[in-house]
Each structure stands twice: as structure tokens, then as C-alpha cells.
Image (cartoon, rainbow, N blue to C red):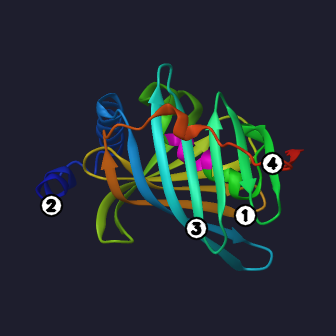
Amino acid sequence: MLVFNMFAVTETKAQGAINEILNRMDAHYRALTSLQATVKMDKYNAQLDEHDLTEGTAKYLPLKGRDALVRIDWTKPVEESLAVVNKRYVLFRPRLGQAIVGKVEKAQGNAKSNSALAFMNMSKAQLKANYNVKYIGQETVAGGIQTWHLELTPKVKTSYKIADIWVDGNGMPIQMRVTENNNDSTTILLSNLDKNSTIPTNVFQINLPKGTKQIEG
């Protein structure tokens, strides 16, 4: 609470606030060796005005060069597993006996969850170079966590028009939302954070059962 009360003094100086938040994000990333968390995803269909909610667990292992290994095991409403390695993803759907594989930037459906998580990898310099960053204010996200809300508008045309990140007092982005050009959006919320535990790298390899049909995404 003290951190937020002290920071509120500088809210009127938007650029100073943005720099302070981005500096904390950089410091947090440098100190982070691994992350395990509960993850909730809300996919909003603007045309139908419908929300598709998914829950599971996430594992995240930062690598050199601002890359990362990611694994998400969805448990509700159905079981699916997503792994991201070397900018390629595998989305295994056991109930269908299929795996969708492809490049991260072309991911669709539940595989798009990694697009939101990708903002955790970006440095202050990358964010300021690629986005117009706006400080929205202090907000409380689900679970009662106080955060700073930043709005990111891409400087060049992309598949989405706006991204939002909610950063806690430690510099950890705990909620991220990507809004597509058609107003559909994907929101990721992280909770029950377990930082800097040992995670074996083989966890990020999905071993597909024999007979699994692979589809290029």
C-alpha cells in the first residue's frame, strides 16, 4: 500500500509515471528466473457479445535475448496443453486426438494466450520503441491486487489495435489484454504466483501420443 501511496504523488506527471513503471518491469524481469501461476483467460467475441472463459496453470522460463519458454495446461472447461519453444507453439487437444502447431505470430484460439504473455518479455526500450505508452491510472484487478494500468498502441500496423497491461508494485505484469482490430479481445490474468522455483526445461516439451493428428496452424 505504501508503494502505491508514494507513487500517487507523481501521477500528474504521466511520462514520469510511465518511466517509473517500465523501470520496475525491467528490474523485475532481470530478477525473475522462473514463474508458475494460475492462469485465467477471457476471450471476448465483440460481434456476438460473448465471453469464453478458460482456466489452467502456466509455467514460464525466461531465456537470454528476451525470449522465454512457456507452457499452459488448460483444465477448464476442457483439457488442452500449449507449449511455446523457439517462437513456435504446439497446442495439444487430447479429446480430439490432434495437435495444432505453427509460428507464434500466427496463433489462433487458445494458442493466442501466449501473445498476451509476450509483453512480459519486452524491455523498456522495446516497449517505448514499438508502442505509444499511456498511463491510465491505478486499478484493482481480480483478487484485490492493486496495479498500474498502461495502454499500448502499436506504432506500426499489427493484427491488434491496442494492448493493455496491469503491473503490480513489484513490476510484475499480472493482467494483459490484447484487443484485435475487430474489437475481439483476449485477456490473461495471473494469480497464485510462484517465482524463481526450479522448472526443468523438459516440462516445455509436449510428448504427443502415437496417432495424434498434427495440423499446421
Q: Position of residue 119 (x, y in %)?
A: 52, 41
Q: Looking at the image, is 127 positioned above or below residue 191?
A: above
On the picture, is 181 further left or further right than 76? Answer: right
| Dot in front, 1 or 4 | 4
Q: Residue furthest bottom?
A: 49
Query: Is residue 16 within the magenta segment?
Result: no
What's the distance in space between the residues labelled 4 and 2, CA to CA?
44 Å
Q: Earlier in the sequence, mark 4 or mark 2?
A: 2
Q: Looking at the image, is 147 positioned above or below residue 18?
A: below
Locate the C terminus and report the quarter of the image it occupies: top right
- Label 3: which secondary element: strand
Q: Nearer the viewer, residue 31 or 147?
A: 31
On the picture, is 5 further left or further right than 18? Answer: left
Q: Looking at the image, is 26 positioned above or below residue 95?
A: above
What's the distance in space between the residues labelled 1 and 4, CA to CA?
25 Å
Q: Earlier in the sequence, mark 2 or mark 3?
A: 2
What's the distance in space between the residues labelled 1 and 3, CA to CA?
27 Å
Q: At label 4, which amino acid type do we have?
A: Ile
- Label 2: which secondary element: loop
Q: Which residue lies under the disc numbered 1?
A: 183
Q: Earlier in the sequence, mark 1 or mark 4?
A: 4
Q: Which residue lies under the disc numbered 2?
A: 1
To which quarter of the image does residue 69 belong? top right
| Neighbourhood count class around disc 1 (C-alpha, 10 Å): few under 14, some 14–19, many 20 upward | some
What's the distance in space between the residues labelled 2 and 3, CA to CA?
34 Å
Q: Which residue lies under the disc numbered 3?
A: 75
> Which residues are drawn in magenta?
114-119
Q: Which residue lies under the disc numbered 4?
A: 100
